[in-house]
Image: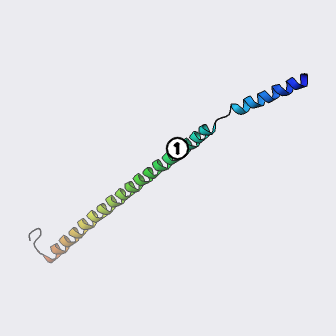
């Protein structure tokens, strides 16, 4: 009789342990939450990369503008120097 009761007790514990696990719906919900989290991280990463690319483009444009301004100033200075050497009139068109 003790063996039968022991087997029944072990079987009932095994059933209880299995029944305490997450259900299929809970597992699917957890998997969906994980997938959504991964998608959100990918989206935020994409936004961050786009913002970084935009900032780099703005910096490159600012550098190009600065170089163009310097080149223009150098060009004007050179023209004025050549005009001064020739004895031309400065500043009047």
* Residue on which the image places disc 1: 37
**Residue 11 picture quarter:** top right
84 lies above or below 43 = below
Q: Residue furthest bottom?
A: 86
**Residue 30 picture quarter:** top right
Residue density around tag 1, few if under 14, some if 14–19, many if 20 or more, within 10 Å: few
Residue 64, percent across and down? 32, 63
91 lies above or below 14 = below
Image quarter where the C terminus lies is: bottom left
Image quarter where the N terminus lies is: top right
With 40 as the anchor, is 65 left or right in this view?
A: left
With 70 as the anchor, is 38 left or right in this view?
A: right
With 22 as the anchor, is 87 left or right in this view?
A: left
At a point 90% along the width and 25% down the height, the residue shown is 3
Residue 28, percent across and down? 59, 42
44 lies above or below 84 = above
At a point 16% along the width and 72% down the height, the residue shown is 84
With 23 as the anchor, is 58 left or right in this view?
A: left
* Tally of numbered discs: 1
In-front residue for pair 21/84: 21
Describe the colour scheme in one phrase.
rainbow
At a point 72% along the width and 33% down the height, the residue shown is 18
In-front residue for pair 4/16: 4
Which SS class for mark 1? helix
At a point 31% along the width and 64% down the height, the residue shown is 67
In-front residue for pair 90/71: 71
Residue 72, percent across and down? 24, 67
């Amino acid at each position: 009789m003790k063996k039968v009761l022991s087997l029944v007790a072990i079987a009932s514990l095994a059933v209880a342990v299995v029944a305490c696990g997450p259900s299929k719906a809970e597992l699917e919900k957890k998997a969906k939450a994980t997938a959504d989290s991964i998608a959100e991280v990918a989206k935020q990463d994409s936004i961050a990369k786009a913002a970084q690319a935009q900032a780099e483009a703005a910096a490159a444009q600012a550098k190009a503008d600065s170089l163009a301004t310097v080149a223009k100033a150098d060009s004007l200075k050179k023209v004025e120097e050549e005009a001064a050497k020739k004895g031309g009139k400065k500043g009047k068109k």
